Amino acid sequence: MNPVSIYYGNLFMTCDRKGDVEPSRQMPLGLFFFDTRFLSTWRLTVNGERLQTLSIDDLQYFESRFFLTPGQPTHYVDTDISVFRHRWAGDAFEERVSVQNHSKEPMDLTIRLDIGADFAELLDIKHGIQRHRETTTTIRDGVLTVRYERGVFVRETLVASSQPCATDDDGMTFTTRVEPHGIWHTDLRVTALLRPAKPADLREALPGHRLRSTEQIRQELDDWVSGAPRLRTDYEPLQQTYQRSLSDLVALRYKGLNYREYQPLAGMPWFMNLFGRDAIFSRMQALPFLPQTCVPALRILSLAQGARIDPFRGEEPGKILQELRYDESAAFNERPHAILYAAADTTPLFVILLDEYERWTGDTELVNELRFEATQALDWIDRYADLVGNGYLWYGPHGSTDGTVGQSWKCSNEGVSFRDGRLAGYPQAACEIQGYVYDAKCRAARLARRVWGDPEYADRLEREAAALRERFNRDFWIEDRGYYAAALQADGQQVDSLTSNIGHLLWSGIVEPDRAEAVVSHLLGPTLFSGWGIRTLATTEQRYNPIGYHTGTVWPFDNSIIAWGLRRYGFRPEAARVAAAILGAGRYFGGRLPEALAGYDSTLTKYPVLYASAGAPHATSAGAPLLFLRTLLGLEPYDDHLVVDPAVPEEMGQIELHDIPGRWGRLDALGRGQPGIARR
Amino acid sequence: MVDDIDRFFATLGETSEGRLPPSRHGTIRFVLHRNGAVDNWLVTFAGGGATAVPDDRPAGCVVNMSGEWFENLLAGRDHTVSMTLRDRAAVEGDLTLFLTFRRLLPPLADTRGPLPEAVAAHAPRPGGGE
């Protein structure tokens, strides 16, 4: 089954091709809100018959339409009835069910909607965990309410119809006569309540109460996207993915419990919540295009910064969160993800984003506002993260929400291994995180000197960064292989597998220039470069698996950071090659890059193979084309100027980007394809 | 009798120094239900720290909870966000002030749950609807 999804913020509905939801404990089918399933059954029948799909209009991310007819495909050509289901996600889930009589005779119809809510947690469904929850159903003023209670924890689903119906515990039945060539319809509204105490909630449940219209939601999207630079290019894969990426990044935001600013979501369907790493990377990728979306992300990460020492959630003062979820397990501290701090890289990345944001926007006000949090983040690196006491950022294993233990972006249990296949132990110092720390300290020094007026702190940070760089290049470099170890073990042993992580080191600037050539030759060599992009793990390594989550797949986000790093070290043709590979792969997905691609060589598969459980849209995959565009045009802010230094391959033709926002106001950039781009 | 809660608020002026972002300003009022009585503590954030006084004036954020659950919070047995999610802490107003307040709690915690939930112990919700 290829499910159909719509979403608005963190409310999403995923159903089968008929528009129905059947109870499922394995698939994320149903209506979800704040990580909880508020509808697990939503099934429409007409005169007792299931419906068949004629077509589906996937109108936009929050709206879809199903054209159906009762009965089996073998005889639906003879049917006299059409059924339309037009639905949209907004402040609530709403659906208009219309039934049309095409015959010359009046029709007596029984239209039945089966309704159920199991209040399952999204993460339980992801991991195949089943829990039974006792629910109660009540019917008041025609509104069907399914309620789940555990102590004072209450979740409710309210379903209301504009047309009168017979409501029972399991659904609604409409009995109606439809005149010849007539049409009947009802408007349904499903409201998911987290705190169903207020009397207003019942009124809100009724379809007469106006919520934001689809036009208003569309306008919101348009307003955001229209503020982004305009792209004109001959290179069709880029043009196609550009609008799609902007729209997805704008759509993948939600308002948390406080209903204020929009926070970034990580991706459909499993990650419709705030993830620190994904939020930071996606905002960084989108900075030249949607700079204003950085502000709420930086603010929420600051607000939720670690304050106590709490081993259960990996919290330490100054640490930046990994993720934030709202389900029952979180509410009762059965799992730690009400705020979870099981990521070691988010803290330096937070500082990096703050600096990158200021470089583009000149918004020193925010940098001053968040000085305390940035300083705390840097203090965390020195005070809490050096578990071994040798000047690196280490992490131990941590039980995360999905059973993974790692704290780097390759957090899955096989994510960090030796060449011979042995898994790396803990504590572990991932190479790319040392790069992030180096970069964070260099950037914080810049902020300290230019914005915070604290040159002594800047000097100290620069000294620390320089010492880290020297130490790192001594301890991580594998001389006889010509690349950096993926990680160190506490005894100093190098985790010697060849991974894409070394590309992040280029981005951070920690690589000694005379070693860059060797690193790049590995990244673009046949064991890491598949033709569709750079693999997470080289084909020569024992744990290589082209369909392993972090052990051989190709991640668009990973590649976009690597391409940026290649540019930093002057490897312009190589950066363009990586960009072209991923953008080319995007063509096969309508411009919407999935979370990850299989690592098969492009000579083996003539099209990029989707990683089995890859979600889409995915924020950092939507951000990837934007960062590639920045890389191709060589956009870099220097003081109040935007430097444009394009390195566009000939086959891409011309790329024009108009009205790039920044501290300079708005400027245009132009890049023309060149035969043979020079390195520099 | 001075208990942990009273002591926490009474010494907040000293213990909070330098623990809050200086940019954070605002007021948060705790309405604590204990033994049939209601205590109001008004906490004011300013200058990188906070002060608390017994006062029932309006505040940017009002948190209704039982004294017992506030003690759990102080002792590090529970977490502000999870308590908010299950309505043990009924927050009205600007939730960000409650999140900022986390920084003022004693540093050591282990919030692995669940704690036994005594339904009778929870505070009535403001605005009714119980």
Image (cartoon, grey):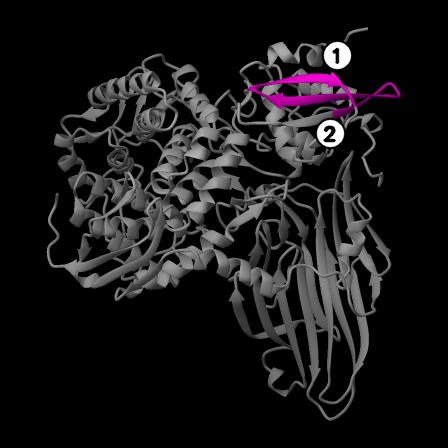
* Residue A201 belongs to magenta span: no
Image mark 2: chain: B
Residue topped by disc 2: B63
Left or right of A262? Residue B88 is right
Left or right of A185? Residue A260 is left
Q: Can the viewer see residue A410?
A: no
Q: Can the viewer see residue A51?
A: yes
Residue A63: percent from the left, percent from the top? 57, 64
Residue topped by disc 1: B6
User: Quick one: label 1, few (<14), some, or many (20+) residues within 10 Å?
Assistant: some
Residue A528: percent from the left, percent from the top? 23, 43
Looking at the picture, which amino acid does disc 2 mark? Val
Q: Is residue A382 above or below residue A406?
A: above
Main SS type for the magenta part?
Answer: strand
Magenta stretch, residue numbers? B30-55
Q: Looking at the rendering, which quadrant does residue A39 occupy? A: bottom right
Q: Is residue B2 above or below residue A132?
A: above
